[in-house]
Amino acid sequence: MGLLPAAGNWLGKVVDLVRANCAHCDRSHRTVCPPGQADKTAMQILQGIAVSPGIAIGEALVVDNEGFRIPSRFVLRDAVEDELKRLDLAIEAVAGEIRHNRDTVTQQLGDQYGAIFSAHLQMLRDPMLHDELESLIRQQHHSAEYAVSRTLRRYAKVFQQLDNVYLAERAHDVFDLESSLLANLLGRRRESLADLEAPAIVLAHNLTPNETARMNRDFVLSFVTEAGGPGSHTAIIAKALEIPAVVGTGIFLADVSGGDLVIVDGDHGQVILHPDQETLDRYKQEIDDHRSLAQRLAGLKDQPAETIDGTRIELLANIEFPHEMQACLDRGAEGIGLYRTEFLYLGAESEPTEEDHFQAYAEVIRAMGQLPVVIRTVDLGADKMGQFPHTEEEHNPFLGVRSIRLSLRNLDLFRIQLRAIARASALGQVKVMFPLISTLDELRQAKMVLADTVEDIRDEGIECADSIPIGMMVEVPSAVIMIDKLVQEVDFLSIGTNDLTQYALAVDRTNKDMASLYRASDPAVLRLIDATLRAARAAGVTATVCGEMSSNPAHTLLLLGLGLRSMSIAPGALPEIKQICRTVSIGQCESIAERAMEMDSAREIDAYLQEQLRKVAPELVF
Ligand code: PEP
Ligand code: MG
């Protein structure tokens, strides 16, 4: 809550401003539009960054007001009087709370501070606000919650748009008031994203990977965030959950209330608020199109990913949680190419023990039978810190104690994980992979700690595989520069294009304002990928791409042309990528890659690859 110098007339000024320009009809009047008119809330289309494909249509759950769900927009005609009573009771209760706070604060800190609450009271008691709420309930039959949320958000938006920074900050006071009224109307019930009880589209300013990982995927139909960049782990989790998601839309939460109808177009990064009937019908058709494509592609499950000229491509899956195994098996994954084990920390109430690690790995390995499982050691730090910080706050966390650096500085933590991996290696075909290797020393140290741990396990008489293949991620330019040496010391390489793009181009993968620069198809990144694939071939070592790039069908054409024969991708993307592999010849992909590698910019390359994709697999272009 902001500090006010006095309970002056800031509120009155803004209320006048709100009323000077009705959001519905551009006219000036004291209350809402007459019946019929106010319902015509204009459709609004927001452009963000598409991070997880598909279409979702549903009711909004706005998370910025502390997770309140506005249960229903409308009440029956004969419930209107009860609804008005509920509203009055809530206003009375909140006024009582505010008076109490005002008196306590005035007593402890003085009149100036108590004045903050007087301003809130003044707003709450404003007769015109009351008229407006009453009119929405009486004439539009809106529920009290919806009337409160919609009206106060409209006020808050006017505050936010004011040129005066001090008054713009007052939007928070209006949101505070909204929260207090909703808390009363909804009996202080708050829904955490993990405990939703009905389907919703989550709208938030930002979501951490941790919060996203805890979402109840049975009810979160989709999510949209004002902030967030294309390569964030929040975006990656959306793909794992197989829900459409859009990030980086910029500020819009004041334009929407819980319960409003929203469409999320995860294919094109669009969010449609208050859609009109025609738009709604078009998107319902698109949902049907997606469904029938998925049904057709489901038939490929047991078919090999083989190009038309007979080259076999290995299609592995990326997972974050053991519960994704079913999705991998359903899509015919040939193994797990990247198990992001740090999510064990992000989703947990307490720090995972060796047994917790072991049980999680055992579940995945048993589900895969004799198929390979690449367990990546924890990549904590940067945007994935969760509730167990192992580093101090850093100015540049993506350049700081992240990933293998964090493991090597916390050897107890590293050993716990390596012991669990060594034990789990007895259960199937386990491989270990170290993330963010940037020097030869780092790789050698990590290998040494692993060798020591395996020796300890054997000394303790615990069963363990005869040998555990060791791989490293290639996701820092220095690793590509040193790749001829690094490749001699590993059994396999996996190119992490998400980080490789970030570090090669010096672009924060989580920053929406840098999204246009963050492109894995940038010629500089492509040269790094090409160099890595060449070095791997020369050394006779397998190289996989496990960054999001390999989930993009247009990029698949290019990667196959550069000689890639193994990809690890989000389980949901497996059918489409298999379809592409089965549609093209290697010769065709080589000519595409040759042409793309001559181009000067990611924009040009992406346009060209999209055009090629449209030619070879038009059914995959939405
Ligand atoms: C990558 O960087 O491409 C990668 C696969 O790792 P993560 O996205 O977990 O950083
Ligand atoms: Mg990475």
Image (cartoon, helix red, strand yellow):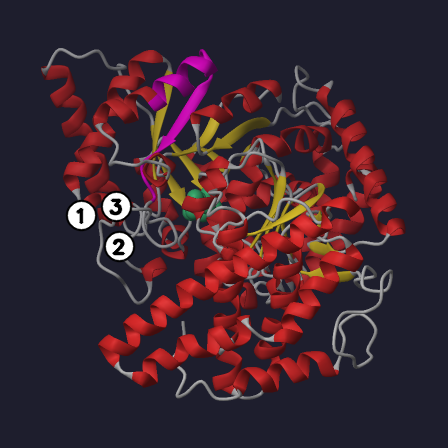
For the residue marked with disc 1, what is the amino acid? Arg
The earlier-in-sequence mark between 3 and 1 is: 3
Residue 76 in sight in this render: no
| Residue at the left extreme, as displayed | 459
- Closer to the chain start, of discs 2 and 1, is 2
Does ligand 2 reach within 8 Å of label 1's beta carbon?
no
Residue 79 place in picture, x, y as percent: 72, 45
Q: Residues within 10 Å of mark 1 (few under 14, many from 20)?
A: some
Q: Position of residue 558 (x, y in %)?
A: 66, 45
Residue behind mark 1:
409
Circles 2 and 1 in contact, beta carbons < 8 Å = yes
Where, by quadrant of the figure, is residue 307 drawn? top right
Judged by depth in the image, the label closer to the viewer, 3 or 1, is: 3
Amino acid on which disc 2 is placed? Val
Residue where numbered disc 3 is placed = 388
Report x, y in % for residue 165.
50, 85
Q: In the visual, does 282 lie left or right of 21?
A: right
Q: At numbered mark 1, what does the secondary structure look like: helix, strand or loop?
A: helix
* Left or right of residue 16: residue 583: right
Q: CA distance from mark 3 to mark 2?
A: 14 Å
Q: Nearer the viewer, residue 272 or 446?
A: 272
10 Å neighbourhood of mark 3: few (<14), some, or many (≥20)?
Answer: few
Q: Quadrant of residue 28?
A: bottom right
Under mark 3, the amino acid is: Phe
177 or 517, which is in the foreground?
177
Q: Can you tell which quarter of the image residue 292 is in?
A: top right
**Cα gap from disc 3 to disc 1, whole angstroms:** 15 Å
Q: Is residue 175 above or below residue 305?
A: below
Q: Residue at x 55, y 42 (%)?
A: 238
Magenta-highlighted residues: 360-379
- Res. 401 mark: 2
